[in-house]
Image: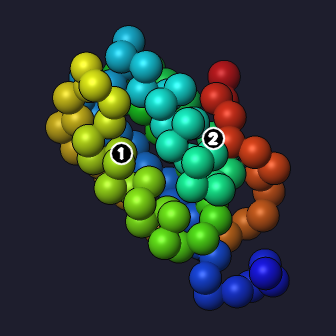
Amino acid sequence: MAADSPARAAFHAVVTGRVQGVGFRYSTIRQARALGLVGTVANRYDGGVEVHAEGARDSLDRLSEWLRRGPAGAHVRDVQLEWLPWSGRFQAFEVEL
């Protein structure tokens, strides 16, 4: 699929609530990889989790829905999501330190 294909997209999300200390980052990685997405996930100093994901738009939609629930033990209060053009700069989905 070409980099400028409309089927590819990206988003940047900030997830707030009880999302640190509950396995949120590694659960996000599992979900994203299962959906064939690439990008990063990182804890924020303010207690939130930041996600940058790229890939097929339908898979991104599914990940964004999952982010609103999170893994067992998480309590998601809000997800601020910004849609972006696909950049192609990621090769895998990993924790950003």
* Left-right relation of 61 to 7: left
Question: Badge 1: how crowded within 10 Å, few (<14), some, or many (20+)?
Answer: many
* Left-right relation of 63 to 92: left
Q: Rounded to the nearest whole Å, what is the CA distance between mark 2 and mark 1?
A: 14 Å
Q: Earlier in the sequence, mark 2 or mark 1?
A: 2
Report the residue at 57% width, 36% height from top.
29
Decide: marks 2, 1 in contact (CB < 8 A)?
no
Q: Secondary structure at mark 1?
A: helix
Name above or below for residue 25 compared with residue 61: above
Q: Secondary structure at mark 2?
A: strand
Please provide percent x and percent y for residue 97.
66, 22
- Which is nearer the eye, 63 or 84? 63
Give the residue at the far front of this rendering: 34
Dividing the picture into quarters, in which one does residue 37 lie? Answer: bottom right
Which circle marks residue 67 in the picture?
A: 1
Q: Which residue is mark 2?
A: 40
Name above or below for residue 1 compared with residue 20: below
Which amino acid type corresponds to the residue marked 2 in the rendered image?
Thr
Name above or below for residue 95 compared with residue 63: above
Which amino acid type corresponds to the residue marked 1 in the rendered image?
Leu
Dividing the picture into quarters, in which one does residue 85 lie? Answer: bottom right
Report the residue at 63% width, 40% height from top.
40
Colour convention of the picture? rainbow
* Quarter of the figure with the N terminus: bottom right
